[in-house]
Image (cartoon, rainbow, N blue to C red):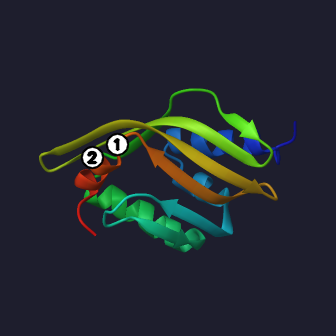
Amino acid sequence: MTDQYPAAVAARYFDALADGDIPAAMALLSPDIVWHQPGANRFSGDHRGQEGVGALLGRMMEVSGGTFQLAVTGPAMVNGNLVAVPVRFTGQRESVAMDMIGIDLLTIADGAIAAVHLFSEDGPAEDRFWGAA
């Protein structure tokens, strides 16, 4: 297995996030990444490029007062260049809390994360947490 293998790229990405090494995590994103944020909230929709994704994640941290966290909860599942990773994400905003499981589906191309699709166990609750669009 090389460091270009999809599972290895995904593991490095989630390890960097767990370590709080945001520059290392961002470096694993393709310059042309498309991040598909689900739901009907202020962050929903497609975010493009490292700059767009960085702005999205920075704003999520700002809105959550720095409390937004993501943790891997099980083994990655690989199908070709797709890697599905079970996660748990939490956050606190004013009097609203979020604590739910989901799946992050990464598309790996040329040793980088080219696309991200996120799935939440409770989309309406996530929308309430992040607030209206």
Image mark count: 2
> Is 62 positioned to the left or the right of 38 in the image?
left
How packed is label 2: few (under 14 Cα within 10 Å), some, or many (20 or more)? some
Q: Image point 48% across, 47% down: which residue?
A: 119
Q: Is residue 75 above or below residue 67?
A: above
Residue at image coords 58%, 69% = 50
Q: Is residue 48 above or below residue 111?
A: below
Closer to the camera in the image, 126 or 33: 126
Which residue is the site of mark 1?
122
Residue 71 makes an appearance in the image: yes
User: Disc 2 residue type?
Assistant: Ala
Q: Is residue 22 left or right of residue 5?
A: left
In the rendered structure, the answer to whether residue 6 lies left or right of residue 99 reads right
Secondary-structure class at tag 2? helix
Task: Confirm or deny contact between disc 1 and disc 2 (CB under 8 A).
Answer: yes
Q: Which residue is mark 2?
A: 125
Q: Quadrant of residue 97?
A: top left
Q: Quadrant of the N terminus?
A: top right
Amino acid, disc 1: Asp
Label 1: few (<14), some or many (≥20) within 10 Å? Answer: some
Q: Position of residue 105 (x, y in %)?
A: 60, 47
